[in-house]
Image (cartoon, grey):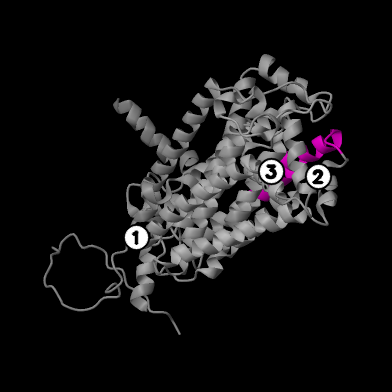
Amino acid sequence: MPETQHEVFPKDPSKTYGLMELVKGTSPMVDKGPEDTVTSWPRLLILEGLLMLGTIVLLLVWSYLVNAPLRELANPDVTENPAKAPWYFLNLQELLLHMHPALAGVIIPTVMVILLMAVPYIDRDRRDIGIWFASKKGKTVAMWAGAYTFVLVVALVLFDEFVRVRSLVSNPWWMPGVVVPVGIILVLSVLLYLIIRRWRPNTREVLVGFFTAFVVTYIVLILFGTLFRGLGMRLIWPWNMPPGGLTF
Amino acid sequence: MNRLSALLINLRNSRVWTSIFRSGYPDNDEKRSLVMVNSLFLHLHPVKVKKNTLKATYTFGLGIIAFFLFLVLVVTGVWLMFFYVPSVERAYSDIQALETSVTFGMLMRSMHRWAAHLMVLTVFLHLCRVFFTGGYKHPREFNWVLGVVLWIVTLLLSFTGYLLPWDQLSYWAITVGTNMIGSAPFIGDMVRLLLLGAKEVGQEALIRFYTLHIAILPLVMTILISVHFWRVRKDGGLSSPEEGAAVEREG
């Protein structure tokens, strides 16, 4: 079957063209909303160009003003004190101070990555795509989940520094190393869920609460590790930080 | 002035010019489409984009900034490779020489360093942006998964580069970092040995981290970024509230 060809009529200069009549009727675009698009040239390209320019200018100025750090030659016999991982791993190193290394350095990060990857397969409602925090309720949930997590993470770090879980339960090794930290994480997660539930949220709003809790924990622990851990990884104020304590 | 514009017009109509730029200045919609489709670099973009894609408070431009930082890192990184030998005898003094006796050496090294940190930050913020706007939803599930992998590859790229200056900072940061990996149950010691090539951080670790940093991980990153961008296009561009509204209408 030959496909229907649309004939193209060239504009005839000897004729005049005008609007003759308005017809009421449906078109394929009815109920579809306006297309709401613009051509990528030039709008998108200008924005991208500006972003790139801004980034490179910021980077040039910053790199001109602040030199990349370089300490003494590596020496396996002289341990740095504090010996810290790069700043973006200091949240894991902070966890290391409070639980068994396998839990802090491998199991928790792996579980977190798997949970993150699972997000789109858990929340499959497409109605709120493209809306920041899903809804007004979602914003409230995020705010309270963030505040809840912030207070608890700070309190837990301080508690383990000044009271020490290991001084309360030290035997057997898996009590302070595994059972207590995992127990605390589970209990506080369930508690977070119970708190969020009072807003009667949908799946996405629950996830917004938990993701916010993850991000706040992630950032607060990086800040602790970067700014508040000095000699022997003891808590200190940032202004007392020994010169080798910042790992950028 | 007239002669100049005549010259420019002649130039633009010349065989050489039209052989390179096929569609002329994009001053109408047809040419605006052609200019995107005819260029290798621009064809990654769609001809038309949704308006909300351009809204600063929707994307904050984080994805494009992260990608651009990656490009800056490739350029400065290749430049640094001309002056650096990954051996425990030479690495540190090469960095010192780079800082003191190579033209723009200090600036290029600083740019590489700060761009790397900035990229780690930007990629994480991009991940948060996509989460909080629900950009991971159908049909973009797998692109979200790829994004999480890209975040991890970014961290690994930064971490492997961290050892290369071979100073106290890098030595002990990598020692602490790989000890954390070594604590994994069952496979930890094996993975640590595979990464370091020895019991301690030394020459074997340096050459392994170097190869990962300049060849393997950038290659993995490039492939994953390509797939990531490709899928953004195939999944209908960036997410938009309009999609949710369409689902609502169709019930």
Say which amino acid is labelled 3.
Leu
Please state the horizontal and vertical placement of residue A220, each as a whole percent of the image.
54, 43
Circle 2 sits on which residue?
B195
Please state the horizontal and vertical placement of residue A172, each as a whole percent of the image.
79, 55
Residue at position x 46%, y 55% in the image: A145
- Name of the residue lying farthest toward the right: B198
Say which amino acid is labelled 1.
Lys
Callout 1–callout 2 Cβ contact below 8 Å: no
Question: Tag 3, which chain?
Answer: A
Question: Tag 1, which chain?
Answer: A
In the displayed structure, A200 sits above or below B113; it is below
Residue at position x 83%, y 41% in the image: B196
Magenta span has A247? no
The crowd level at tag 1 (other Cα within 10 Å; few <14, some 14-19, many 20+) is few
Question: Tag 2, which chain?
Answer: B
SS for dot 3: loop
